[in-house]
Image: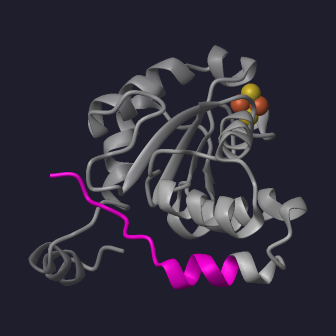
Amino acid sequence: MTSKIVVDRKEVCDIIDRWGKNPEYVIEMMQDIQESYRHLPRAAMQQIASATHTDMARLYHVATFYKAFSLQPRGEIPIQVCTGTACHVQGAQRVMDAFSRELDLRPGDTTEDLQFSLDGVRCLGCCSLAPVVAVGKKLQGGLDSAKVGKLLDRYRKKTPQEKETRDAQGND
Ligand code: FES
């Protein structure tokens, strides 16, 4: 079953008010919505359109133009595999394939529980550490495909029993 993100109308209203309901700031409103909901829910877009008297078509144009916006819910932990030249040479595709296998995801997709999303990106700016992956805000350099499962285990949600076992073993 796919998890759902429920839109809080009051929260969206507060965001719109923060920008003075000014149509010149619809991008800023959309950025705030994207940050809160990890995507742009249609209901929130409709609220912006109605409060700022902006056409929905214009909002969708903006939403699809900027890569920072997503119309589909993104994972709590975004995984970005660098596919730039330096990383490509150092086996970025094998690393990407390993994430795809582990998460059963194609690049651009999100896990059903909305925990992870997987994307390829161009150069994360630290080519000397190639191949590089950003997991959330953390950069991981020199990653090889064999280490991907172990890396993900650190981020995967644990059941209370798994947490207990892990704590008892003194792992972080
Ligand atoms: S090419 Fe991957 S960090 Fe620059």
Task: Give, as a single range, the part of the protein colored magenta.
Answer: 1-15
Horizontal placement of 94 versus 150: left or right? right
Determine the image quadrant of residue 106. Answer: top left
Q: Residue at x 44, y 51 (%)?
A: 73
Q: Residue at x 84, y 79 (%)?
A: 20
Q: How is the image coloured?
A: one colour
**Count of numbered labels shown in the rendering:** 0
Q: Indicate whether 104 appears above or below 162.
A: above
Q: Residue at x 56, y 55 (%)?
A: 40
Q: Residue at x 39, y 40 (%)?
A: 147
Q: Is residue 4 magenta?
A: yes
Foreground of the two, 164 or 65 = 65
Q: Indicate whether 131 appears above or below 74.
A: above
Determine the image quadrant of residue 163. Answer: bottom left
Q: Looking at the rendering, in which quadrant would you find the C terminus?
A: bottom left
Where is residue 165 shown, x and y percent of the image? 13, 77
Which residue appears farthest toward the right when viewing the image? 24
Horizontal placement of 3 versus 62: left or right? left
Ligand 1's quadrant is top right
Where is residue 93 shown, x and y percent of the image? 51, 19
Where is residue 14 shown, x and y percent of the image? 66, 84
Q: Indicate whether 54 appears above or below 63.
A: below
Foreground of the two, 89 or 28 = 28
Q: Is residue 3 magenta?
A: yes
Foreground of the two, 120 or 19 = 19
Where is residue 91 shown, x and y percent of the image? 55, 19
